[in-house]
Amino acid sequence: MEWAMSLLLNHPNVLEKARAHIDEYIGNKRLVQETDIPNLPYIQFIINETLRLFPAAALLVPHEPSEDCTIGGFDVARGTMVLVNAWAIHRDPMVWDDPLSFKPKRFEKMANEGYRFIPFGMGRRKCTGSGLANRVIWLVLASLIQCFEWKRVGEDLVGMS
Ligand code: HEM
């Protein structure tokens, strides 16, 4: 969550757009709620873009093949520890346009993220809590945007290290 807020503070235009969407769709008579999620996709794009640049589990969790296999041309023996570097995949210029920039809008055109956006892993052992996690993050982030005015204290960007 703090990554998303920091990125928003460093990209006030994105924050402004998110606020405008909330103002337009919900206004200020009631709080954002779970049923608003499908109607405000831009908030989800911000969450995705944050998880792309700063995946919570940069190397996912260690896996091991139950049989000898070949991955990307490499022979991998059964039982070998395999780490998937989601951090590197999420920032790979071969699969992302302008990968280091924070551009939530890029998710607008992504119908199928394929294998390049994997903050929750993929396949049979994918995070079982991804739906819950996304909803909770969505509600917290949307509430923070709806209820408060946010800006940096000075000109300096919020550090992301
Ligand atoms: C932003 C929040 C979260 C992130 C980024 C995250 C990420 C991940 C990742 C990367 C894995 C490993 C996938 C793999 O094997 O490659 C995982 C597994 C798992 N996560 Fe999450 N997770 C989050 C929240 C949650 C929540 C809220 C729950 C439960 C309520 C949860 C439950 C699990 C479980 C049970 C597994 C193991 C699945 C399996 O091995 O079959 N996670 N998560």
Image: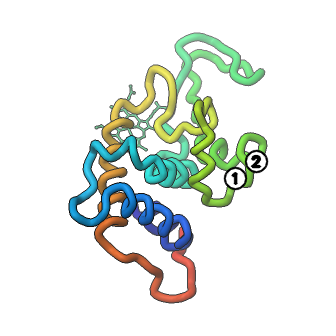
Within-10-Å neighbours for mark 2: few <14, some 14–19, many 20+: few
User: Which one is in front, 17 or 78?
Assistant: 17
Q: Is residue 161 visible?
A: no
Q: Quadrant of ligand 1?
A: top left
Marks 1 and 2 sit apart, C-alpha to C-alpha, by 6 Å
Question: In the picture, residue 94 is in which quadrant?
Answer: top right
Who's the residue at 36% across and 66% down the image?
145
Q: Position of residue 15 (x, y in %)?
A: 48, 67
Mark 2 Cβ inside 8 Å of ligand 1: no
Image height check: is 81 above or below 4? above
Q: Position of residue 153 (x, y in %)?
A: 45, 87
Q: As shown in the figure, which amino acid type bears the numbered disc 1? A: Pro
State the colouring used for the structure image.
rainbow
Q: Would you say 158 lies left or right of 30 here? A: right
Within-10-Å neighbours for mark 1: few <14, some 14–19, many 20+: some
Q: Position of residue 122 (x, y in %)?
A: 51, 28
Which of the two labelled residues, at mark 1 and mark 2, occupies the earlier sequence position? Answer: 2
Question: In the picture, residue 39 is in which quadrant?
Answer: top left
Residue contact at pointers 1 and 2, CB within 8 angstroms: yes
**Quarter of the image that includes the N terminus:** bottom left
Who's the residue at 58% across and 10% down the image?
67
Q: Which mark is residue 84?
A: none
Who's the residue at 44% across and 28% down the image?
126
Q: Position of residue 97 (x, y in %)?
A: 74, 49
Q: Would you say 66 lies left or right of 68 here? A: left
- The residue beneath circle 1 is 99
- The residue beneath circle 2 is 93
Image height check: is 149 above or below 113? below
Tag 2, which secondary structure?
loop
**Quarter of the image that includes the C terminus:** bottom right
Q: As shown in the figure, which amino acid type bears the numbered disc 2? A: Pro
